[in-house]
Amino acid sequence: MTAITPTTVPSTEPTIATEPGAAHRTATPRHFLMCPPTYFDVLYEINPWMDLAVPVEPGRAMAQWEALRTAYEDHGHTVHVIDPVPGLPDMVYAANGGVVVGGRALAARFTHDERRPEGAAYEAWFAAAGDLGVTSLGQAAELDEGEGDLLLAGDVLLAGTGFRTSRAGHAEVAERLGVEVVTLELVDPRYYHLDTALSVLDAADGTVAYLPEAFSPASRAVLRERYPDAILATPADAAVLGLNAVSDGRHVFLTDRATGLHDRLRERGFEPVGIDLSELLKGGGSVKCCTLELRPAGAVEGSA
Ligand code: ARG
């Protein structure tokens, strides 16, 4: 006998005409780690976005960061905050601090000397986060810029290389976290971290968005094969770091400037949440860069 489940949707429920597919997207609550931009500035140039001649407005940077944090909380997510360290202006880009899978955290080893000390700061935070279901595995031995280059997509970690995280770093992550790693080679210095060129939107149905031109021909072929239904971003959307996005499975938090990508997301049933992070863009980062996902032990893996 097949049980018949009566529908519980009241017939008066309004339909959202502009988001026809939204009904099949489900948000799951996330735990994020963020670092306030207290000491954020552009004091060196380690990516093409950074320009010592362009001043940062500290008050604006903080207000924008607070708005991102509030947007997460308003959508049901939990934001944990790591204390910023004076003299580490890029520490606001928390995604680079490490990668956490199944509650096990591997802290970063940065490519550039200017950012190196951030690895220890994030490692110390992970080591003290046992009550959140996080266990520290220490710092990576190989070059590894955390979720800047390591994006969990279901049961694999998509792993960028070419500018920061090394292939040896990928091998180390695979071994220490026990996760299959898919190496992707980045070729455009503007998209120096994987999270500037690719966004995992829904790991369950394999929806990702990426900029093909940011990858080597071989890596494009890997992406085409693995994600035939991917959203292909335009150069214009990538150039405002639109792909530097965070998805909870339904809501996609991204810069308000990537309007074309907002439309593509709506067509696929996502709800874009536009955020103005123009000050953080001066350091070469946007929404995802400011956000490290904590996946505590026991949490459902495979979440985007
Ligand atoms: N100025 C920083 C750097 O070049 C920006 C890091 C952005 N973070 C990211 N996850 N893409 O290292």
Image (cartoon, rainbow, N blue to C red):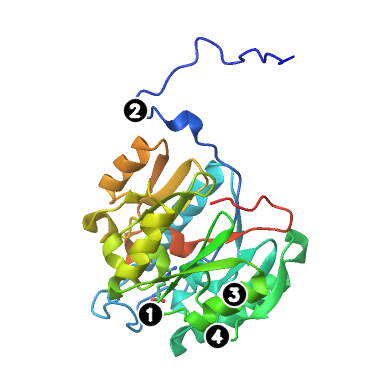
* Residue 253 horizontal side relative to residue 49, left or right: right
SS at mark 4 in the image = loop
Q: Do the residues labelled 2 and 4 touch (CB within 8 Å)?
A: no
Q: Which residue is drawn at 60% across and 52% down?
A: 302
Secondary structure beneath dot 2 equals loop
Q: Earlier in the sequence, mark 2 or mark 4?
A: 2
Q: Kindly report which numbered mark, 2 or 3, lies closer to the viewer in this rendering.
A: 3
**Whole-percent x, y for residue 44 in the image:** 34, 84
Q: Nearer the viewer, residue 111 or 169?
A: 169
Q: Name the residue under label 3.
A: 173
Q: Residue at x 39, y 27 (%)?
A: 20
* Residue at image mark 1: 163
Q: In which quarter of the image is residue 130?
A: bottom right
Check disc 1: other Cα within 10 Å, few if <14, some if 14-19, many if 20+: some
Distance from the alpha carbon under mark 1 to that under mark 2 = 39 Å
Q: What residue type is labelled 4?
A: Glu
Please name whichever residue, 65 or 106, is drawn nearer the observer in this view of the structure: 106
From the top left corner, tell me how far across and down residue 139 is, in percent.
Answer: 63, 81
For marks 3 and 4 on the same chain, the one whose residue lies earlier in the sequence: 4
Q: How far apart are marks 4 and 1 (CA)?
A: 14 Å
Instruction: Please name which of the two marks, 2 or 4, marks the residue nearer to the observer.
Output: 4
Helix, strand, or loop for circle 1? loop
Give the image quadrant in which the ligand numbered 1 is located.
bottom left
Mark 4 = which residue? 142
- Marks 3 and 1, how far apart at CA: 17 Å
Amino acid of disc 1: Phe
Residue at figure coordinates x 61%, y 14% from the top left: 7
- Could you tell which of marks 2 and 3 lies nearer the N-terminus? 2
Q: Mark 2 points at which residue?
A: 18
